[in-house]
């Protein structure tokens, strides 16, 4: 996964430029480097994951660290096929240090169950790891600082499919300003990778507009269909 100069600079500032997996294409110096034994690779991934968690928990790169109670790294299986990405922690998530634990989280759990999975078998993360005050939208500079963390998570998880939850997640993940209504039903890829990204409404929006749940269900069905095709 190629990082651009700005992201590399951000990573460097965070001290995570050393975190390339030894077997990853970016880190490889010769083809032999890529042929690491499976166990060694798994141990490497686990170590990098732990380092990343630690770095995120003490991050002070943007102003949001001043108001947080907890960072919210993500929850679920770090080797999940499905990665679900929301916007940013809310008040309850900030208190508990876990994404989607409020009412929207209950609905998200139901959406996940509706496609035959559960919270433990997917991975759930956000664009931002810290809560913006009064649940305002993430600012571009906050997204820029937090982005390398999510990118590293994606590199480590290597999900087969990413589901972006809501406009903020979709637009920031894909670097577009397309309205969410136009993004639904389209297959995107996470920039710099071949990982497919589909877009659906944010569960909090669905709580406010329950009549849109039907469309969200169509999105989930499309995601399942695409996922099956990838097998
Ligand atoms: N909304 C989000 O986008 N993420 C959370 O973790 C909680 C609410």
Image (tube, rainbow, N blue to C red):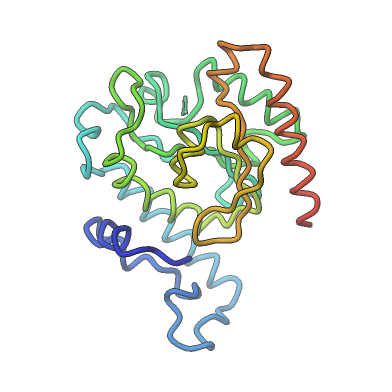
Q: Is residue 46 left or right of residue 38?
A: left
- Give whichever of 12, 94 is nearer the camera: 12
Give how far across and how far down residue 201 sits, in percent: 59, 27
Quarter of the figure with residue 48: bottom left
Q: Is residue 52 left or right of residue 167?
A: left
In the rendered view, would you say 119 is above or below 25? above
Give how far across and how far down residue 229 sits, in percent: 80, 53
Q: Is residue 87 left or right of residue 166?
A: left
Q: Is residue 97 left or right of residue 116?
A: left
In the rendered view, would you say 224 is above or below 157? above
- Give whichever of 213, 15 is nearer the camera: 213
User: Residue drawn 31% across and 46% down?
Assistant: 144
Give how far across and how far down residue 74 sits, in percent: 47, 39
Give how far across and how far down residue 162 sits, in percent: 60, 45
In the rendered view, would you say 137 is above or below 122? above
User: Residue drawn 33% across and 45% down?
Assistant: 146
User: Residue drawn 60% across and 40% down?
Assistant: 163
Count of labels in the image: 0
Quarter of the figure with residue 141: top left
User: Residue drawn 74% across and 48% down?
Assistant: 227
Q: Quadrant of the C terminus?
A: bottom right
């Amino acid at each position: 996964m190629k990082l651009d100069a700005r992201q590399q600079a951000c990573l460097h500032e965070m001290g995570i430029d050393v975190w390339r997996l030894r077997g990853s294409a970016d880190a490889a110096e010769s083809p032999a480097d890529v042929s690491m034994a499976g166990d060694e690779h798994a141990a490497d991934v686990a170590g990098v994951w732990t380092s990343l968690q630690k770095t995120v928990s003490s991050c002070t790169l943007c102003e949001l660290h001043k108001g947080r109670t907890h960072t919210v790294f993500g929850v679920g299986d770090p080797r999940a096929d499905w990665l679900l990405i929301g916007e940013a922690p809310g008040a309850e998530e900030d208190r508990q240090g876990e994404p989607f634990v409020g009412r929207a989280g209950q609905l998200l759990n139901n959406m996940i169950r509706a496609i035959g999975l559960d919270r433990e078998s997917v991975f759930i993360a956000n664009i931002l790891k810290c809560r913006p005050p009064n649940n305002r939208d993430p600012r571009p500079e906050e997204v820029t600082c937090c982005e390398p963390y999510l990118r590293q998570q994606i590199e480590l998880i290597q999900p087969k499919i990413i589901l972006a939850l809501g406009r903020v997640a979709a637009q920031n993940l894909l670097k577009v300003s397309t309205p969410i209504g136009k993004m639904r039903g389209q297959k995107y890829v996470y920039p710099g990778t071949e990982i497919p990204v589909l877009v659906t409404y944010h569960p909090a929006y669905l709580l406010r507009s329950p009549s849109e749940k039907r469309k969200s269900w169509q999105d989930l069905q499309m995601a399942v269909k695409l996922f099956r095709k990838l097998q």
